[in-house]
Image: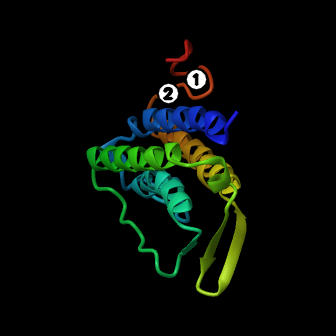
Amino acid sequence: MAILDALLPEFDHEMATTRRVLERVPDAQFAWKPHEKSMSLSELAGHLAHIPFWCTATLQDTSLDLATHPRNPPPSTKAELLKGFDDRVAIARAKLIAMTDPEFLVPWTLKHDAQEFFTMPRISVLRTFVMNHTIHHRGQLTVYLRLNNVPVPAIYGPTADEPQGG
């Protein structure tokens, strides 16, 4: 079995689940924050929608220097949020299906100028920095939704809002 055969179904599942959560983000609450130190709803949703770019960045280069990587402004509407997410997922998925097993094992580095944060094989970066990062922020976003009385969609099973799982 090739690495892609195991990774692609996971990627597709997590991206579809993430989109269902992003679809629930209410435009009217974009500025809302649960705490003064927290990101706003639009900042958190925008960050989550941007994570598929990290998949593309991991697969097309062997490093990313945050000092030269521009920050993305948060989206101003849910339509903009979803379009950006969909576009990034499509590009990332195309990059994924073009990869060979040896390419997944190439080391990849995240740094800021001379400070290196980590170097890992691409497959490890995809599982941790892309997939787990997505899952982490998606979990945060579901809490934001719950605190704003927005129904939380099923993720790995039923929720209080979708007891049958969707």
Can you tell which mark lies on residue 159? Answer: 1
Can you give x and y, in whole percent of width and height, for residue 21 in the image?
46, 36
Can you give x and y, in whole percent of width and height, for residue 10 in the image?
60, 35
In the figure, residue 164 lies in which quadrant?
Answer: top right
- Note whether 67 is above or below 149 in the view shown: below
Can you tell which mark lies on residue 102? Answer: none
Closer to the chain start, of discs 1 and 2, is 2
Q: How many numbered marks does the figure carry?
A: 2
Can you give x and y, in whole percent of width and height, for residue 68 in the image?
47, 80
Can you give x and y, in whole percent of width and height, for residue 5 in the image?
62, 34
Q: Amino acid at mark 2?
A: Pro
Considering the image in quadrants, where does the N terminus appear? top right
Q: Is residue 29 left or right of residue 33?
A: left
- Note whether 112 is above or below 62 in the view shown: below
11 or 77, which is in the foreground? 11
77 or 52, which is in the foreground? 52
Contact, mark 1 vs mark 2 (Cβ under 8 Å): yes
Label 1: how many Cα within 10 Å (few below 14, some 14–19, many 20+): some
The residue lying at 48 percent from left, 51 percent from top is: 52
93 or 87, which is in the foreground? 93
Element type at mark 1: loop
In the figure, residue 105 lies in which quadrant?
Answer: bottom right
Tell me the CA gap for discs 1 and 2. 7 Å
The residue lying at 47 percent from left, 33 percent from top is: 16
- Note whether 10 is above or below 36 in the view shown: above
In the figure, residue 9 lies in which quadrant?
Answer: top right
Residue assigned mark 2: 153
Label 2: how many Cα within 10 Å (few below 14, some 14–19, many 20+): many
The residue lying at 39 percent from left, 41 percent from top is: 25
